[in-house]
Image: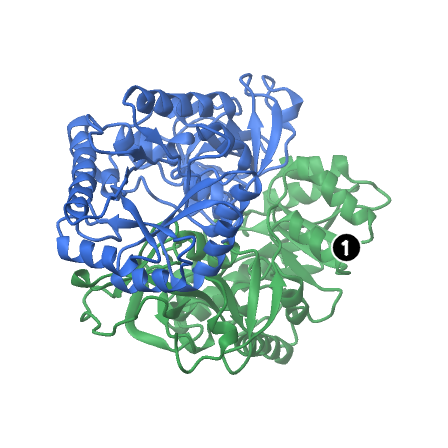
Chain colours: A green, B blue
Amino acid sequence: MNDHSTPILASQGTPCLLVDEERMERNIARLRDRLRAAEVAFRPHLKTAKSWEVSRLLMTTPQGPATVSTLREAEELAAHGVKDITYAVGISPDKLTRVQKLRAGGIALTILLDSVEQALAVAKASDPKDPIPVLIELDCDGHRSGVKPQDATLLAAIAQALAPRARLEGVLTHAGESYEARGSEALSAAAEQERAAAVMAAETLRAKGWPCPVVSVGSTPTAFSAQSYAGVTEVRAGVFVFFDLVQAGIGICTQDDIALSVLTTVIGHQREKGWTIVDAGWTALSCDRGTATQNVDQGYGLVCDLEGRPITNLIVTIVNQEHGIVAARQGTPRSDQEFPIGTRLRILPSHACATATQHDRYHVIGAGQSDVTAVWPRFTGW
Amino acid sequence: MNDHSTPILASQGTPCLLVDEERMERNIARLRDRLRAAEVAFRPHLKTAKSWEVSRLLMTTPQGPATVSTLREAEELAAHGVKDITYAVGISPDKLTRVQKLRAGGIALTILLDSVEQALAVAKASDPKDPIPVLIELDCDGHRSGVKPQDATLLAAIAQALAPRARLEGVLTHAGESYEARGSEALSAAAEQERAAAVMAAETLRAKGWPCPVVSVGSTPTAFSAQSYAGVTEVRAGVFVFFDLVQAGIGICTQDDIALSVLTTVIGHQREKGWTIVDAGWTALSCDRGTATQNVDQGYGLVCDLEGRPITNLIVTIVNQEHGIVAARQGTPRSDQEFPIGTRLRILPSHACATATQHDRYHVIGAGQSDVTAVWPRFTGW
């Protein structure tokens, strides 16, 4: 047991998920200040947090606006009084019953799609007295889903298929490929590509007579790198609330900004291999290897002491279900530090969304890094 | 919507976890029959299932024996009347309070350790009127934790440190490296190495006067490959209950034995890339890439139709949080099959333990592959 620790954090059962409230609030303030200065609205993505308490701090009002990745998140937020929600994953027709139930309950829920097929299904299901608001998803960088922003024919066909029973609200894009950008120039270029794609598609639709009031962009790397938001009406971002080693590798934050960690306990050693074995495996850390393709491979997480200070070159190199193997990063000298059985360590996550998903609650730690000041439940499932 | 389906499975909300009860029961019978014929006891590992209903089918009696990977599993099983449980992850001293609480409740809970340091802590915490039973973990193949089986000095030192307050019950090993074995000869050799290591260590301890009644071995590949269990008193295995693509790649099962799948819905396309986009991302499938180093890389899972028939060469190639990208396996021709928006597909898991962990319940499907006959909750957390 570490002498510097107070009993409260040090006696917490492990593994468990910690959130450093001070760092989290600093991260939130950083983006909110930036967007306020740029006079663009903020619609935080709550898929990383999946917690009412964190959502409250992220949203600019207790009623929203908010972005979610599952209808479960929308339902949980609605139960807490959030009124303005965008479900930012392409809709399948069978989910429209839940969408309509939320809307009937007074939630301004907007959905996303990128095909005429979906638009026809939404129009068919929509009540003309309460047309479902729809954003067309754009593919600004080849990352995933979406209409190519220059595909005027498809954009118009989708708008046409929605009318008049559903309502075209605007366009939405996510620069997922910005995760591969390195350096401020490339990051700004990714942000500009995202902005230009959204604005171009909106202008195309407006020229064809569709009002298209919403122009929504966002990803954590681009939200912090855009030089202009001209024509953009709202920005979405999620993982920045906690940040993680992937974002630090991209250069969007430093390791000192990472607000999430997994508390773990040393349960063994293989000294001749330089291994310390801890009780955080992939059930606690996730199998995410997001830094594997970055300059510095952080394995399944960077090891810190109980107070959250990174321990030079020690990472989780292997994960099994309930075991993590802590060792020196490849190509670095083996550590001569000994962590006796029972030592508490903290692991900074490779990908905060993935690590948080493995847990059903947050243990909130205060500025002294020694007390658990609150326990916040997480939403799970779909 | 698929014409062959009945409404019940086809109308299930997605993503969700399916278990094919018939395949599962066949898998269980296969190992139980094998071990019964070999006259060796079976102590199923319940870390894959984490469900009372599945555990009941796995265990040879409703009271056990059972193996678990977390104390939470032990507590859940104890609440269902299981009496004989081995917690097969190295103990840390802070967890002994929960161990003792279970033991005080009448549970024969045995713990694991591989150091004098842990043995002294267990002896100190143990009540001489109810000595905690302990297995010494052995490292039979360099996979993870454990004492080298030939390290007679350390084995004796641990036994000595436990006495007399705690009770040395025996030895336990897990041939984790058997996952890398290919071909029946290599698999049998891995099983023999596991058996020989455990028996050697037990004999060493007995020669020094420690009774060592339990000799416990197990992993799914070795449990199905051992030619001899001479000297072994019990076998543990877990993932075989569902099997998965990793086990099929090792050759321990066929794809037709895989009892677990994730039901998903098509939500989009990028046709020029040959992509079908589904609503099962890493939250539903996990990020596990266990087949990446095997002969056939199955990505994040093999795609099947709603009835569970694999679709030649289609796998999940990319996962984001709530999106899976389905495409032809690299080096194979692009599929010309079109899956309209709303089509239901099933994904066979790379690693069943990891995929199951992402869900809080099983949807049990009957032999017709069309009805959800039951919903079984899963244990979560630690």
Q: How many marks?
A: 1
Q: Which quadrant of the view contains residue B326?
A: top left
Give the percent coordinates (x, y) of residue A214: 68, 59
Placement of A22 over or under B181, stated as above or below? below
Closer to us: B75 or B355: B75
- Residue at 40%, 72% (x, y): give it: A251
Dot 1 crowding, Cα within 10 Å, few <14, some 14–19, many 20+: many
In the rendered image, which residue does mark 1 sit on?
Answer: A108
**Residue at disc 1, secondary structure:** strand
Placement of B9 over or under A256, stated as above or below? above
Q: Which quadrant of the view contains residue A120?
A: top right
Closer to us: B166 or A344: B166
- B263 left or right of B295 in image: right
- B320 left or right of A274 in image: right
Give the percent coordinates (x, y) of residue A346: 41, 69
> Which chain contains the residue that carries disc 1?
A
- Residue at 73%, 52% (x, y): give it: A109
Which residue is at the far front?
Answer: B129
Q: Is residue B321 visible?
A: yes
- Residue at 61%, 22% (x, y): give it: B371
Give the percent coordinates (x, y) of residue A125: 76, 36
Placement of A255 over or under B44, stated as above or below? below
Specify the quadrant that holds the C terminus of chain A: top right
Give the percent coordinates (x, y) of residue A369: 49, 79
Specify the quadrant that holds the N terminus of chain A: bottom left
Q: Is residue A297 visible?
A: no
- Which amino acid lies under the numbered mark 1 shown in the image of this protein? Ala
